[in-house]
Amino acid sequence: MNIDFLSSVDTICALSTPAGSGAIALIRLSGSQAVDFTSTIFKPKRTATLLEEIESHKATFGGIEHNGNLIDEVLVTVFRNPHSYTGEDVVEISCHGSVFIQQKILELLLSAGARLAEPGEFTMRAFMNGRFDLSQAEAVADLIASNSEASHRLAISQMRGGFSIKIGDLRAKLVDFASLIELELDFAEEDVEFADRTALFKLLETIKTEIESLKSSFSLGNVMKHGIPVAIAGKTNVGKSTLLNALLNEERAIVSEIPGTTRDAIEDTISIQGVTFRFIDTAGLRHTEDTIENIGIERTYEKMNQASVVLYVFDITTASEQEIDDAIAEIRVLLEDSEKQIIPIANKTDMLMESPHSFKKLVELDTLFISAKRNENINLITDRLLSSAHYGETGDQTIVYSLRHFDALTRAGQSIESIEKGFAENVPSDLIAIDIRQALHHLGTITGEVTSEELLGNIFGKFCIGK
């Protein structure tokens, strides 16, 4: 990022609604001169009203003018520090959504002395002013990007500080631990132990267990945020692409009777009852001399390994019982996770003239019978997928969904293990204290007690401008 946030005292402005025309647009300013700069271009409808005297959190109607010409009639809302999003004086201008009006107001504010905000700079200032910690600030971006009930719930929980409380509790326990070790260092020459080693071992085990519990939630948090990946696999021409189109209710994949039409994975997402599923239509599985198609088949197995669920699609009119058994067994061998859920999908039921001989076996395999072409029984697939998603059972559990947080927890856990090893091997207290500080450092990077401009720039640089 280009701006030194840690020392910036400029008043910033930006469009906080999506770019382009719309009914309403919102322009936001933050900084000590936010009200002054707005006053130079805003004329309240009530002539006796001064923007500088407007009560906090009150909206005032008036006009934006330039050289005596009216640009637009707007609502201006003032938020006085520290009771604002950023903790500074904030002004929000609600204008009509004309691109010309938006740009003209921004130009006038820049001429008055404001500068354009960098991506995430408003939220960065909120963090720097103690409005919330770093993990809560990250949750703001996640909340904006949430596209399902599950990802929304995760972001809301983190933004409200549930995760921060957990990390704060872990750091507090470690600080108590560190204080006892540091006290021993002060009296090192007298060979005095202030810390009961048995009690310290129990405390370390408690901390390590809590860290492992948070880490173990990452797999669930990851799919809640990004969606459950579902691979659609099977031989060529069994209707995989038709099934993808039926699931998405749109013509996303090319459908053709020519074998090998799909040579690379096609992905798209859909939210079903608040749960996001990421469907992946893969290349048909068959033996071929076509180099490009073989690359696609290799990627099919990669996608199946990345997926949480595999929909194995076959043509009910031609597939034999042995062929289905062999295909599922082969997939099981190639999958890294032998317990991964594989759902057999018997497609093209509309072309059946009579019940297949393998019907009993297929029922035993919990096969779903569909016609992707006629969009029949597709709900059976979505119902089965929903039943495998246990989002509603998380209760008050704190769930980790950020890779950055997971990495910090992993490093903190490794430091805890080093402390335990040090005690077991009678390592001097000053060396153990180093590992304690490392554990505190890694936990501190999550909430922002420990930070750097590079880290902050990396996090807030991914925000949208205006937030």
Image (cartoon, rainbow, N blue to C red):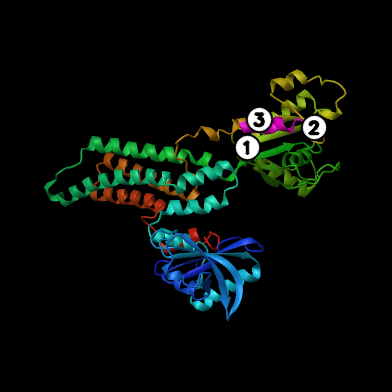
> Residue sitting at 55 percent across and 33 percent down?
390
Secondary structure at badge 1 equals loop
Q: Which one is in front, 177 or 198?
A: 177
Alpha-carbon span between mark 3 and mark 1? 13 Å
The image shows residue 36, relative to residue 329, as above or below, that is: below
Secondary structure at badge 3 equals helix
303 relative to 162 in the view: left or right: right
> Residue sitting at 35 percent across and 42 percent down?
417
Closer to the chain start, of discs 3 and 2, is 2
Q: Please tell me how crowded label 3 is: few (under 14), some (14-19), or many (20+) other residues with Cα within 10 Å.
A: few
In the rendered image, residue 51, in percent from the top left (x then y), is placed at 46, 69
Q: Amino acid at mark 2?
A: Ser
- Contact, mark 2 vs mark 1 (Cβ under 8 Å): no
Alpha-carbon span between mark 3 and mark 2? 16 Å
Q: Which residues are magenta?
A: 376-386
Q: Which residue is mark 1?
A: 273
Closer to the chain start, of discs 3 and 1, is 1
Q: Amino acid at mark 3?
A: Arg
Alpha-carbon span between mark 2 and mark 1? 23 Å
The residue mark sitting in front, 2 or 1, is 1
- The label number, if any, that marks residue 371 in the structure image: 2
In the rendered image, residue 194, in percent from the top left (x then y), is placed at 17, 42
Magenta segment includes 380? yes
Q: Residue furthest bottom?
A: 67
The image shows residue 139, relative to residue 345, as above or below, that is: below
The residue mark sitting in front, 3 or 1, is 1
282 relative to 51 in the view: left or right: right
